[in-house]
Image (tube, grey):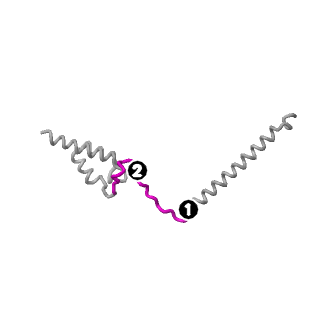
Amino acid sequence: MYLIPALDLLVMVFALVDIIRADRWSIRHLDKSIWIIIVILLPLIGAVLWFILGRDYGQAVDRGSFGDPRRREAVVQPESSTERELAALEREIAQYEQDDRIRRLEAKLRARQGENTPENSES
């Protein structure tokens, strides 16, 4: 007697948990919040629609990470020679800017030290 409503509730809760834990790339057709509303308003039908239409099963799921994003291996794209040259130029520009700032600060320091010498303070 209580088996059908309990099964319906179980499927609805399972679908809701799956929707909430799903990544943005694995949801099709509607926004996550819309899918949650559909599953709550139409428990069994909404859950079936979610698993058939809403969930994208095309991407492989990393089962070894246990949901921890730090354990997933980052996909490293090989850099092109142009990207390496641009990065080297950016580092060189940053070094020149830092050297220029150091020179300006040293000049300002020398000017302040020149103002505070005993010869200038006696007058």
Residue 5 belongs to magenta span: no
Give me the disc on residue 84.
1
* Viewer-nearest of discs 1 and 2: 2
Task: Residue under label 2, please give it.
Answer: 71
Look at label 1 and name its amino acid: Arg
* Residue 1 x, y percent position in the rendering: 12, 39
| Most foreground residue, 58 or 39 | 58
Outermost residue, top side: 122
Residue 83 belongs to magenta span: yes
**Where are the magenta residues, as a range?**
60-85
Q: Quadrant of residue 12?
A: top left
The quarter of the image holding the C terminus is top right
Which comes before the other along the chain, label 1 or label 2? 2
Against 66, residue 117 (above or below) is above
* Residue 105 x, y percent position in the rendering: 72, 46
* Residue 103 x, y percent position in the rendering: 72, 50
Give me the residue at 30% from left, 47% from top: 18
Q: Helix or strand or loop: what does disc 1 sit on?
A: helix
Look at label 2 and name its amino acid: Arg
Q: In this rendering, would 14 be left or right of 64?
A: left
Q: In this rendering, would 30 be left or right of 4?
A: right
Give me the residue at 46% from left, 61% from top: 77
Against 27, residue 37 (above or below) is above
* Residue 109 x, y percent position in the rendering: 75, 43
Q: Helix or strand or loop: what does disc 2 sit on?
A: helix
